[in-house]
Amino acid sequence: MADYIKRNYEGQEIDMPEDYVKLEIESYDPSHIYFKYNTGFTGSNITKTSKDGFVYFRGTNQNNKFTLNTNYNILEPGDYRVEIFCFTTTSAETVSLKINNKTIGTTQSLQAKDIFMRRVDFGIVRNLPGGNLPISVYCGGHAGVISVYMRKIRETFGDTENNGILTIKSAKGTVGNPKQPDTLEVTIKNEPGAYAEGGFKELKNKTGLLFAYRDPVNFYIVNTDGELQQVFGGYISSPLLNDDETNISIACAGRLKDAELRRILKQITIGGATSDVTTLTYNAKDFYDALRYLCQSVETPVQLGNLDKIVQAIPDKTGYNVKYTSTVAKKKLSTKNMIKTINKSSVTLRNYHKKKKAQRSVLWDSSWNKAGEARGYKITNTPVFFIKYGMGPASSTKKVKVWVPKQYTKTHKVKKNTGKYVTKNGTVGYDTNKPFQAYIEVQYSLGPLKTAARKTLTIDFTTTDTSINKIGAITPIIQNNTAKQGELDIISLLRSSYPTGDFYLRRISLVYPAPTADLYDPKTEKSSYKMNFYGAGFREGVVINAEVLQSSGQKVADFIYSTQEKIGFNMYMVYAKDRSNDKLMLVKDESEVTLIEFVEGPGGNVLGINNLQYSPVSELINSVIKVYKTSDTTNNYVTSKEVESIFRFAEHQDLEVLNDKVGAFYATYLAKTDVDKNIDPSHTYTLPIGGYPNVHVGQLAISTLNNEVYNDCQPIESLEYEYDPAQRPMVQSTVGFGEMNPDLKADLNMVSLRKTIQTKRTAFAGGATEEEHVDLF
């Protein structure tokens, strides 16, 4: 017999057993939908214009609010959902509404990251009277109003305790699948007299039913903690009456379906990256900012429930660094075969023009501060190296006077136009086609004393380093009249060789090997091979790499999914009764362990074990080869092996061709990381359990099973639920451990095949030479 839990439900106390489920559907009366478009409006400070195919009203004087007035002749009183279609604005503007001289809902913000067409939900107006009702919209001058949209609603619900008019025959849903909205398939009984004589049949809708496409749906289950949890919030995709008209099958898509319906019309750039189409670009500070932009672009915006807390928790404290606003720092910056020019807040460095001259600039050195050098500059907890650089105004032609030394004829007379200044065409400014050339060199030690052995790593910048010291690359953005910041998480890379211990900064330099030919004519070229530098150092937080998302014309949903992957988070929805209040939540991959444990046997919650797999033949990798370029025509490779695993199971190789000239160190780091991730394949399985667990995809969960070989702590990869009165318990869930349910995986693979271009290359031209003895320091 089911255990009953007392809960307060919609103003009345009812009994909810552990198998309790509830379904809500908000449908609309197609005979009572009211709106005006383009005409029928009056007001003050209004002008009519158009954008993206919509005619809308905005303020004539956009610095002032405007009022838009109209009247709707409501033929039948009742409950109406009221929405305003608007254009958002990047300034702090709001919109409010009065119907029949009464304020409706609350004043709502129209401020967004860009100008989007938005559906602003003012909620349900209860007991709206019939008749010719005055409507007034009050809006900020920079925003715009397209229409006021009113629909008479018909709220229906049903639960397993026979409350409401919907009788739930069965239900099945998925939660938190990657790259897909949640789903719900529910079957209800079409009972004569439940709503009308023909049950839920209604000829006014094209579906022939009370329910239609995009009607909002909510579904609730009492979870294993005894709490009523909303597990689905979305819309009807397809309602179908079966052949004998006894049942109605309703397929539903979750809230993120909204993001599949809208396309991105701009390129999104990250961290100062530059798009070729600058007028159609949104410049996001980082991927968190890009995610906010994407969610705001949805017609009914998706709220980001915990993004602010996540961003606020990201450490951004700067550690040891140098800024060239300091007069002392500018003077101490030393050069060898580079030209230094001191500016107010930066230093301009220029390569020396002569060939066969190795060049170096020391941007910072621990010896600049003797006391600091004695105690050591620890950078262990500030892992992100950064360098701030930029270019001045564009190169332009300018007449310059050049001294021409005297030259003599055979009769010892001075040749014409020699021995004097002559005017020639020269250049000034900053030539982006001939930027400053150098790679970055960082010296560090593993101990604080200044006598500790120094180690060197290099980072590709405007030129590449071909030594084994290269740890990665910072690709500069060469653009006039800008200052950019390049970053690389150095400490995380070093941790593969030094799992414990501290790191101490010794020196930051820019290095350019001796050029084989003269770089430029110093007499006339004043614009080439130079760059401004504003500072460098180490900071806390995560790396913000410059990147252009090729987003124009793509679905918003695709980039929401890819963006959350780039920041290393899983996401799940927290649903509300109204779609405008649904929230997208982010959780760090595998950073949480569920409170519930999955236990098989007496007193446990696991009903069995399905889809058991142990597939080391397809998952085990104990030998990784990374091929990389050392020049345009030369391939090298590095390899990392887990010897004990090879001896036991034979060598299982994986090969990847890396992009461009990443260097031996970084290639070795990637090889070692891949081996570490794949040398210990475990069992994967799905566990059917009684009830609905309060968990989400991405959390780590502990399973304790009858066969202890299968006991593990693995990430939850999939979550399904099913309600069926014919089974016991009536509510059951299927949790995928380490591998999602095969049926869901098949669906997802189909989506992936349609959407994804394979990026990992395993073929390359020519042979490759092994780079031996690559020591990760």
Image (cartoon, grey):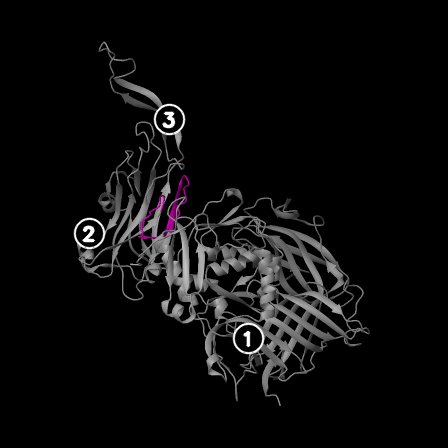
**Which residue is the site of mark 2?**
367
Range covered by the magenta-colored residues? 461-486
Task: Determine crowd level at label 2: few under 14, some 14-19, many 20+ residues with C-alpha closer than 10 A.
Answer: few
Judge whether residue 467 is colored magenta.
Answer: yes
* Nearer the observer, 593 or 3: 593
Q: What is the C-alpha distance between the residues marked 1 and 3?
A: 71 Å
Q: Is residue 147 above or below residue 643?
A: above
Circle 3 Cα neighbour tier, 10 Å, few/some/many (<14 / 14–19 / ≥20): some
Could you tell me what secondary structure mostly forms the magenta stretch? Answer: loop
Q: Nearer the viewer, mark 1 or mark 3?
A: 1
Inspect this view and state whether residue 300 appears. no
**Mark drawn on residue 398:** 3
CB atoms of marks 2 and 1 within 8 Å: no
Residue type, mark 2 in image: Ser
N-term mark: 2 or 3: 2
Give the residue type that dot 1 points to: Val
Q: Dot 1 corresponds to which residue?
A: 735
